């Protein structure tokens, strides 16, 4: 499915379940997300994390709502299932779409400003470097006899400084590679939204609305 | 028909924010089209600034142009529309880590070509040809963050080739490139010049340029001006770099071991980078490590400092380094990082020096000695400056002084001579020599730059085909 359409559908559904209290809806969305992930051959380990980790948080929430608050059982069930629905909807998007595909689609289909699209993409591509940078900063300080804990301001100062510098350099590098804001670009891969994408997204959305009117919890 | 474009700099003055004086002062120079122009000069004299100004990046991104114009052919750089500029002029940056915005080699090339609005059906063809021209077709699908410094520079040059800019600017492009790759890159640049391109390259290490550069320009550090060198001046400039590299090294025999490596294996991205390798590092001596780009020299240092995972055993004085407390080990085996900024913990030069003095493990570096080190390295007037506002060469020098003062038993140095001019290089070599002879420090140095370092190294450890071995000769 086209990344922009997929993202829009998932965002709308996630927004919708934030304001409705249907356990059935949440469960169906979770199952749809699960099926979609299985079709895309998600790794078993990832699936295991998806099933267990949200459970911990959801259980903690339910516990506090039921025993520390005045929530009904139904509301606790909504919260519990909503947590899973969010995770599986999110996973259905992030595990099946690369940032590069999303960026191309947002640029070509959603017509977002390229500055925004490539800015975000450059930032995403920088994440592994930031992680490595933090480890290196700590080690460099240790060699000078200074131990930086995760709460040390120096660690954040250095990390932010590195990020600022990288952002400036990335902007220079992009400019040097011919990038100019608000000018047309060609596209080696044309990403289109097929009729099938629209039909699937719209009919899925309408079908799901039906659930809200069913006499189920 | 090839478009001929002179690059003319007229009465150009440029000053950074908060800088006490202009970095370039009323510079007049013409870089002729269709030529390979070499721009030499000590670090921190404004070579990068000039190149970035020609590329149109400055003053957009930094600093102020106080006077003058730069023209490409008939048009002032400032008048050329940004969208037209990159087909006319492109800059290859000094730091290989900061050339790219995308994740893979292919995506970055596509990004650049799309920016130039190259028709979609031509992009793949142009991309493949550019990679083949530089000889790196095999890197096409690789992730950029996983390439070595030298590989990144090759990719950056391939992008410029693909973009087909008329004027190619290079800012110390070979600082982390091994001699073989450097040689092939230079030949490629010469081929581009023969095809009608204009190349302007700034560098400190002048090896090999004597035969390749058509014109040689020097930036004078005192007057902040540029002049073209005549034959005699050229000869003098290149002289220190033309002596053949005939360095001979001993093979370690009776020397006590400081560290040893047994069955070391390093794996990167699922590919065996190094090993299994077994060898020793000798105490109180200077060992030079050489090897082509991407063979794993820096990763080996990461293993020695426990910054990366490895299999096998590394010992320090017969003790497994994994069994030594991390904080103690960190001050025992120090690493001078390839990127100077990584090393800094404080904000100004003085603060950084004070930190090293506070935690120093030796009293060899007295205040008097430190002052004269700074004077010899032309750093005295920068003592109150913010570290991050220094030039690359100056950062490197401050970094080196700080790491020497620490006085750790073992000092690993990853490309410590990167960005240093010849005079600074001599001073640094002398400092390292005295750290070894007078302090008994064990030095392990990765360097591509070998000129002007005669007699510094005792041993030569070569990394080839994933194996380390001691060699008597270079190459």
Image: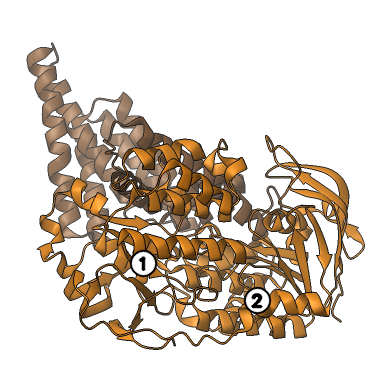
**Circle 1 or circle 2, nearest the eye:** 1
Return the residue nearer the eye: B334 or B299.
B334
**Whether residue A202 is situated above or below residue A99 in the rendered picture:** above
Return the residue nearer the eye: B258 or B198.
B258
Look at the numbered disc 2 and give the secondary structure of its residue: helix
**Shade of chain A as shown in the rendered figure:** brown
Residue B283, image x and y in percent? 24, 69
Q: Quadrant of residue A86?
A: top left
Which quadrant is the C terminus of chain B positioned in?
bottom left
Residue B262, image x and y in percent? 15, 75
Q: Which residue is mark 2?
A: B122
Q: Which residue is mark 1?
A: B298
Q: Quadrant of residue A54?
A: top left
Residue B200, image x and y in percent? 74, 69
Look at the numbered disc 1 and give the secondary structure of its residue: helix
**Whether residue B216 is situated above or below residue B347 in the rendered picture:** below
Query: Image check: B41 left or right of B80?
Result: left
Q: Which chain is the one coloured orange?
A: B
Return the residue nearer the eye: B102 or A74.
B102
Badge 2 crowding class, 10 Å Cα cut-off, few under 14, some 14 to 19, many 20 or more, is: few
């Amino acid at each position: 499915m086209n990344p922009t359409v997929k993202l829009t559908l998932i965002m709308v559904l996630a927004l919708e379940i934030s304001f409705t209290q249907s356990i059935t809806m949440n469960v169906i969305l979770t199952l749809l997300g699960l099926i979609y992930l299985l079709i895309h051959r998600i790794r078993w380990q990832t699936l295991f994390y998806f099933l267990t980790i949200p459970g911990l948080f959801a259980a903690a929430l339910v516990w506090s709502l039921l025993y520390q608050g005045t929530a009904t059982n139904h509301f606790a069930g909504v919260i519990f299932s909503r947590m899973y629905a969010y995770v599986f909807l999110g996973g259905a998007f992030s595990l099946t779409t690369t940032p590069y595909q999303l960026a191309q689609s947002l640029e070509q289909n959603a017509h977002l400003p390229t500055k925004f699209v490539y800015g975000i993409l450059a930032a995403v591509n920088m994440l592994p470097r930031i992680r490595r940078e933090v480890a290196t900063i700590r080690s460099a300080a240790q060699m000078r006899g200074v131990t930086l804990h995760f709460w040390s301001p120096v660690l954040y100062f250095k990390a932010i400084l590195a990020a600022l510098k990288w952002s400036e350099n990335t902007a220079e590098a992009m400019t040097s590679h011919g990038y100019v804001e608000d000018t047309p670009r060609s596209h080696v891969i044309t990403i289109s939204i097929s009729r099938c994408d629209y039909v699937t997204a719209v009919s899925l959305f309408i079908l799901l609305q039906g659930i809200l009117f069913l006499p189920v919890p | 028909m090839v478009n001929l474009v002179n690059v003319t700099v007229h009465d150009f003055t440029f000053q950074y924010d908060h800088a006490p004086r202009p970095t370039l002062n009323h510079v007049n120079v013409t870089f002729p089209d269709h030529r390979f122009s070499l721009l030499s000069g000590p670090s921190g004299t404004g070579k990068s600034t000039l190149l970035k100004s020609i590329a149109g990046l400055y003053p957009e991104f930094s600093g102020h142009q106080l006077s003058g114009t730069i023209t490409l052919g008939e048009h002032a750089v400032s008048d050329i529309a940004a969208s037209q500029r990159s087909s006319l002029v492109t800059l290859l940056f000094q730091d290989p880590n900061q050339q790219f915005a995308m994740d893979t080699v292919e995506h970055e090339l596509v990004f650049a070509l799309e920016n130039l609005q190259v028709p979609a059906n031509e992009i793949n063809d142009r991309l493949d040809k550019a990679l083949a021209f530089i000889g790196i077709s095999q890197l096409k699908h690789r992730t950029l963050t996983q390439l070595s410094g030298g590989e990144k520079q090759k990719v950056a040059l391939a992008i410029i080739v693909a973009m087909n800019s008329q004027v190619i600017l290079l800012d110390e492009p070979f600082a982390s490139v091994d001699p073989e790759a450097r040689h092939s890159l230079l030949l490629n640049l010469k081929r581009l010049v023969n095809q009608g391109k204009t190349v302007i390259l700034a560098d400190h290490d002048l090896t090999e340029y004597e035969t390749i550069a058509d014109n040689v320009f020097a930036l004078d550090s005192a007057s902040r001006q540029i002049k073209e060198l005549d034959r005699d001046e050229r000869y003098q400039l290149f002289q220190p770099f033309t002596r053949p590299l005939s360095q001979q090294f001993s093979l370690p025999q009776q020397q006590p071991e400081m560290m040893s490596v047994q069955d070391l294996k390093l794996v990167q991205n699922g590919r065996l980078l190094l090993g299994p390798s077994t060898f020793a590092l000798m105490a109180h001596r200077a060992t030079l490590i050489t090897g082509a780009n991407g063979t794993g020299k820096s990763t080996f240092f990461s293993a020695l400092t426990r910054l990366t995972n490895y299999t096998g055993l590394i010992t320090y004085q017969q003790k497994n380094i994994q069994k030594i407390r991390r904080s103690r080990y960190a001050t025992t085996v120090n690493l001078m990082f390839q990127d100077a900024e990584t090393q800094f913990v404080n904000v100004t030069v003085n603060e950084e020096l004070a930190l090293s003095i506070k935690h120093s493990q030796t009293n060899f570096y007295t205040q008097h000695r430190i002052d004269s080190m700074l004077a010899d390295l032309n750093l005295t007037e920068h003592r109150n400056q913010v570290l991050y506002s220094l030039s690359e060469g100056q950062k490197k020098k401050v970094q080196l002084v700080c790491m020497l003062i620490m006085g750790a038993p073992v000092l690993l140095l990853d490309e410590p001579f990167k960005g240093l001019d010849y005079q600074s290089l001599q001073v640094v070599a002398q400092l390292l020599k005295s750290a070894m002879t007078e302090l008994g420090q064990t030095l392990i140095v990765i360097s591509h730059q070998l000129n002007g370092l005669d007699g510094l190294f005792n041993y030569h450890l070569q990394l080839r085909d994933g194996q380390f071995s001691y060699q008597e000769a270079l190459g």
